[in-house]
Image: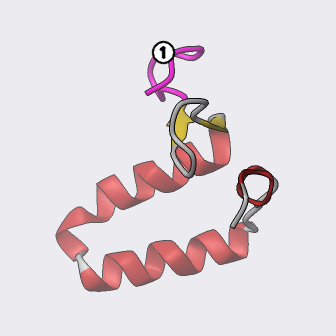
Amino acid sequence: MTVAQLTTASVTIADLRQVVAAGVARKPEARSRIEKGAAIVLLRAIVPDPQYVGCFDVESATEPGTFY
């Protein structure tokens, strides 16, 4: 997979719901963390890391404009 393919990926809300449901089914104790991750996918920027091919920087949920 190329970096261009990674940067143009998208996910539907229906697909994300399925992923969350599958994750919660496997790890019910992690429900809040799984749901928080899904919210980040929907609401925050996720951009390719310029140093590491295949890795991404994700915008902070609490500090917009800060990436990890």
Rendered location of residue 24, percent (x, y): 34, 76
Quadrant the C terminus occupies = top left
Q: Is residue 47 above or below residue 54?
A: above
> In this orientation, which residue lies closer to the viewer: 11 or 31?
11
Which residue was labeled with disc 1? 63
In the image, farthest residue toward the left: 29
- Residue 63 part of the magenta segment: yes
Q: Is residue 55 above or below residue 6?
A: above
Please identify the quarter of the rendering in which residue 10 is found.
bottom right
Rendered location of residue 15, percent (x, y): 67, 76
Q: Is residue 56 above or below residue 66?
A: below
Q: Residue at (50%, 23%) from the top-left corner?
A: 67
> In this orientation, which residue lies closer to the viewer: 9 or 32?
9
Please identify the quarter of the rendering in which residue 32 is found.
bottom left
Quadrant the N terminus occupies = bottom right
Q: Residue at (61%, 30%) from the top-left corner?
A: 50
Q: Tell me the chief SS of the magenta region.
A: loop
Q: Is residue 23 left or right of residue 54?
A: left
Q: Which stretch is magenta?
A: 59-68
> In this orientation, which residue lies closer to the viewer: 34 or 6?
6
Rendered location of residue 12, percent (x, y): 76, 68
Q: Secondary structure at mark 1?
A: loop
Q: Residue at (73%, 59%) from the top-left corner?
A: 2
Q: Is residue 55 left or right of residue 12?
A: left
Number of marks: 1
Q: Residue at (42%, 49%) from the top-left corner?
A: 36
Q: How is the image coloured?
A: secondary structure
Which amino acid type is marked by label 1?
Glu
> In this orientation, which residue lies closer to the viewer: 41 or 24?
41
Check disc 1: other Cα within 10 Å, few if <14, some if 14-19, many if 20+.
few
